[in-house]
Image (cartoon, coloured by chain):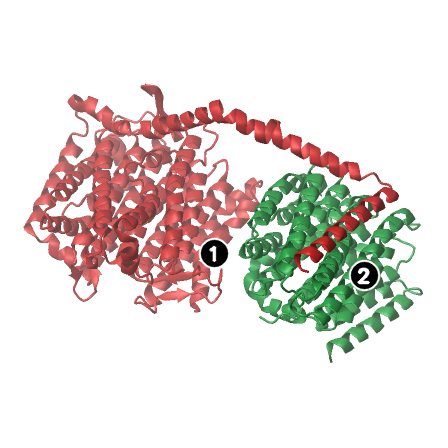
Amino acid sequence: MTAVTLALVALVILVLGAVGSFKFRPLGFLGALIAILIGLGTCPLYYGIFIFAIALVNLLSLTALQDIIKGVDYSLVGLMALATMYIFTTHDFAMVLVALVLVSVPTYILVMLRAGKANIEVGIKYITFMVLATVMFLIGAVILLYAHAHAPGAAADGFGFIYAVGYVMLVLGLSLEVGVAPLHEWVPDVFTAGDPIPISIIASLAKVVPFVAALWILIPISNAITPSLVLFTAVLAAISMFTGNIGALTAREPARVLAYSTVANMGYVLSCFVVIANHEYVYFAIAGGLLMLFANAVGKIGFFNAIKGEGAYSPFMYILAFSFIGVPPLMGFWGKLYILFSMAKMEYFWLVAIMVINSAISIPYYIRLAGELGVSWRMNLVNLICLIAVIITLVTVLFVPVDWFFKNIALVANSLGVVI
Amino acid sequence: MNEWLVFLLLFLSPVVSSIPIALLYKSKEWTARLPYLSVFGIFISVLMSLYIFFTFPSELPDCRFVSPYTWIPGTGIDIVLITDYLSRSMGVITALIAFFIAIYGLDYMRGDYRPSWYWFFFNLFTASMLLVVYSDNLFLLFVGWEGLGAASWGLIGHWFRDDDEIAYVGVPGRKVGPLEFCWPPSFGGWRAISTIRFGDVPMFFAIAAIWAFAGGNLNISEIAWGALFTKLGAAGTVILMLMLLMGLFTKSAQVPFSEWLMTAMTGPTTVSALLHSATMVAAGAYVFIKLTWYIQPWNMHNIPGVESVYVIVLFVGLVSGLYGALAATGMLERKVLLAASTMSSLGLMFGSAAASYWLPKEVPGTGMNLALLVAFWYLAVHAFAKASLFLVSGHLIHATHTRFSVGNLEFGKKMKATFAVTLIATTFLVGMPPFTAYWVKSGMDEVMEHLLHEGMLLPLILLLATSLTYSAILARFTSLNFIKGEKPKHEHLEGGNLMRVGYLLMASILFILWYLIFKNKETVGFVHAGYASTSILVGIAILVAYVGALYKPRISSLSAIGTFFNDRMYLPYLNDYIIPKIGFFVAHLVHGYGNRGIDGFFNTKVMPGLFGLISRGIRCIQSGYLAHYIKVVLGVVMMILILAAIGGVYLYP
């Protein structure tokens, strides 16, 4: 069966599960689970497994939340996971934008979930910015595509202006969507006022597609102007790292620390955009960016669930914290290493230095967080979720990513229109 | 059996078998039983090392095993093991000695206050040492090497509470100048790790340099050493090899890095026997022999720099040999005396291995270099003999409640097995005809005599002086503990059967080695050298020195010089006075002049101020009002878009 057919089958099952959940709630969970299992067949296996694992812990953690749309919430997560898997296979510009919207819109509803009534106040704050972000992203993408269609490869006759505006709009849309400073204002408020569980989904699963979609569009259409435009991205990334890390260092509340840590992490991922003009090192950048996103996702899931469950098993918390800091051989280390490597290859040494300094700044607050959220062992759902998160983080201990990760990068790079 | 399964069992069984006791450290009941499991783990290693010895190929390239699992691909850092002549023999030696000492340890460590710590590190050590022995890849070897350092620190400082004077080295309260010449276990552990670290860091850089200059290959048997040295030039070769040798010299306690070994005697005796006489300290000499084996310096007389390296090693080794032997003449502490004699032996190993540069002599039919074989066989004989002596002193310390040499003939008669093992181990080790070491030492005499042709007389003189002194100190050890020493104040003679089993087994191997010297074809050169008239003369001189010291172990008229030797010729001043003074001077400099600026920048003024400012800025935006946020976001977006538009229009018209 082709990927499209598989995706359609998965979608039907997802919808059936959602409908069925009105009668019998576990059907929603079951439908989502089967759908993402089928979705595994639509994308490169290793990514599929990571996304499947992240979606699975998201689904599991949702079982602890008694919200007003119980049952359908699983389907929303399933939909996001399917879109995240599908974006690695599609070769269609329209489908990339569809995937972006399909990941973004469910979060509008998820963010309002909590036990009992909907959390309208958080919803308004979040949706306002998300709508703006999506619109900017889409307009930017369309402008770029238009410019590319008329002046491919070079900026001829006034197209420099159009490229620049398109690029900047797309990157600003992305920044607003994922929470890159200085457009991060919604992040600390939403992360502290929302329920930790839906927030953990927004901080994990929802972050992958915007980045991949942006790379999907920017890499193939890079041209002579791109090297000067990525400087803008690099500055944005640097601002985001400092804002996030210093903000987290001087924040008290765990949810707020995590919000700022997200801002910082998005800065790290954004910094790998400096390679989009050079297809030679794009492998490393994508590998680094994705590993960083995965490490960030499982770490956030673990920490937010620990906040919800008033603490999780202490060693788990420390392992996740070390991964965030970038201690080898945990996953966060490899993410940072590849990003640094790609930046060094592009001779962005000042950004390398800033990222290393920022990693150092982040050490105290991650350790503090692990100390505050760490408790002794209890047998409960939170610890199960954290255990899965830790196992994913430790995958890179057994399998040093260079080898297996790179083989599959080729597949992703192909779907991004890059042939190396 | 699959070869990788054999290797996995060899390396992992000691570690895995000691994990239960490490985890159950709180349970008295289990920590009393689980040592047997740890010993069993080492026993499996013994079986595997024997299996390798008898069935694995010994010739290149078949004896090199490259793991199918690539560790860090494309870097040349792979899991590569080798089972050549040296590795397969050294593997059996290591595993056997560890096993015998582990059996002894079951008795010796009974009732100790932290058995989990002891057994975990003991077994970790065994696994690390085996890794060093079988590694062909320098990086993998270095991993094992660091394991040795960690285990050594853990085991020397085992009695970290410093609460029992019997574990100290030196006499408490005895001052020599401003320093108190007395070291508790915690200090001993620190001295060990700090000295070894001092050598390991340059060694690590040397390995990195080899990697960089040898085309990314780190396999000892594969590196094109000649090409590497030619490329580096004379100065480069000397610097590289000296950096590498820093690791080996510090590990093998060669002058001037010997102090840590003396105070390593604060650890349990089993540890002294295994790590600080038979295996770990010998690792430095072993790695040097192994490197030289593949470097083949005797073929490199036209490459500048190589000779200087081997001259340095030759003299560092021989001087350490004489220094250790002389220092031991004044010592009364049983283990410290043996430690000094150990560094002396290690020096001889380095010295004779280094002599291979001038000795292109191959043992017929084997292709092996005589000087390297001498060094390696001396390592083997020394390992079993010295380990036996350490185990004996451990038993004596238990029996007499003192670490100083005491014991008269009456006491000796009560400890028959112990006395007998001491006599065997000393006579078999010093080079007295016709026992085991005599034949090896004769080979060594021949090697040093050969240097006379190169116009070097000093090595032979140093070797002879060391050999005679060495014979005297071991005789003195025997005499002061069993024949002419004072009557012990306490005698605790019950029990200790497993301890006896341990050292009897250990000493019995000396007979096997004796037999092997005559049976093996590669040692035929030793036998031949043993019948040479000069060797017989030296042998007789050694016998005379032994008997003389046995008859008169203390000479009161020489007590002043004895004290000087006992104080290790004031070498502790280097470790505990001069180097700390330099450190304090630098600290003072930094504190007095640099600190205010550094502190002000990082700690009190600039950085905290900057962080505070940024933090306030970040929080100031976070008002919580949506309208405010929209203003900020839209403002930033607008501003950037305008900038982008201007940039786009003017930069790329």
- Find disc 1 in the rendering and name its residue: B12
Residue wearing tag 2: A77
Q: Which quadrant: the N terminus of chain A?
A: bottom right
Residue drawn 57% across the image and 57% down it: A342
Q: Residues within 10 Å of mark 2 (few under 14, many from 20)?
A: many
Q: Chain of mark 2?
A: A
Residue at screen point 32% across, 61% down: B221
Alpha carbon of mark 2 to alpha carbon of mark 1: how far?
A: 44 Å
Q: Quadrant of the C terminus of chain A?
A: bottom right
Count of residue discs:
2
Q: Is residue B147 visible?
A: yes
Specify the chain shown as green: A
Q: Nearer the viewer, residue B617 or A121?
A: B617
Q: Is residue B321 above or below residue B18?
A: above
Name which residue type carries label 1. Leu
Outermost residue to the bottom:
A1
Q: Which chain is red?
A: B
Q: Position of residue B581 (x, y in %)?
A: 38, 25
Which image quarter: residue A273?
bottom right
> In the image, residue B269 lies at what x, y percent?
37, 38
Question: In what element is the residue under mark 1?
Answer: helix
Toward the viewer: B218 or B144? B218
Mark seen at residue B52: none
User: Residue at 60% of width from left, 72% of height from top?
Assistant: A419
Tell me which chain the residue with mark 1 is part of. B
Looking at the picture, how far across and down is residue B636, in whole percent?
77, 47
Three-letter amino acid code of the residue under disc 2: Val
Q: Write down the quadrant of residue A134 in the picture.
A: bottom right
Instruction: Residue B105 in the image: state x and y as whole percent.
Output: 41, 43
For the residue labelled by badge 2, is the local secondary structure a helix, a strand or a loop?
helix
User: Vertically, is B352 above or below A137?
Assistant: above
